[in-house]
Image (spheres, rainbow, N blue to C red):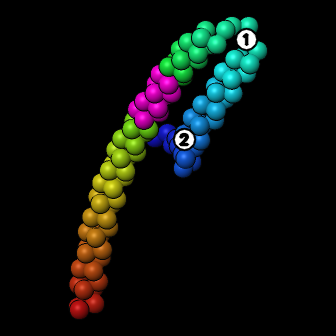
Amino acid sequence: MENKEVVVYKGSVGAWINGLMLGMLVGAVTALLYTPRSGPENREMLGEKTSQIRERAIEIVDDTRSRASHVIERARGQLERGSEMMREHNKELREENRIMEDQMRKTYDL
């Protein structure tokens, strides 16, 4: 079985999204400062860009949730399989222990 390590840093997705949003905001403001458009044109463009950014952020969040959910489900399945293997192994060990105790009793007439 192939072992894959998944490292999840608490808050890393949120920090990434915050950085993405901040970068888009800085880019939009910079574009507004250097554009030859009029005020109403700039406001309309800003509204459109804001909507696009919001939609993209929602897509990113939904995709991240979906991927995280998939990883969690796989981890649960692996944990359940591992737990079942441990239960079976413990059952076998208890049976071996019982057999050895029986043999010791017979050997030493305990």
Residue neighbourhood size for the residue with mark 1, other residues' Cα within 10 Å, grouped as few (<14), some (14–19), many (≥20): few
Q: Magenta span has 15?
A: no
Q: Is residue 75 left or right of residue 87?
A: right
Q: Magenta span has 62?
A: yes
Q: Is residue 75 visible?
A: yes
Q: Amino acid at mark 1?
A: Thr
Residue at (59% x, 11% y) in the render? 40
Closest to the observer, 42 or 28: 42
What range is drawn magenta here? Answer: 54-67
Residue at (31% x, 65% y) in the render? 90
Numbered label attached to residue 35: 1
Residue neighbourhood size for the residue with mark 2, other residues' Cα within 10 Å, grouped as few (<14), some (14–19), many (≥20): few
Q: Secondary structure at mark 2?
A: helix
Q: Is residue 34 left or right of residue 19?
A: right
Closest to the observer, 106 or 63: 63
Main secondary structure along the magenta-highlighted residues = helix
Residue 41: percent from left, percent from top:
61, 9
Is mark 2 in CB contact (under 8 Å) with mark 1? no
Q: Secondary structure at mark 1?
A: loop
Note whether 95 is above or below 49 in the view shown.
below
Q: Is residue 5 visible?
A: no
Write down the residue under mark 2.
14
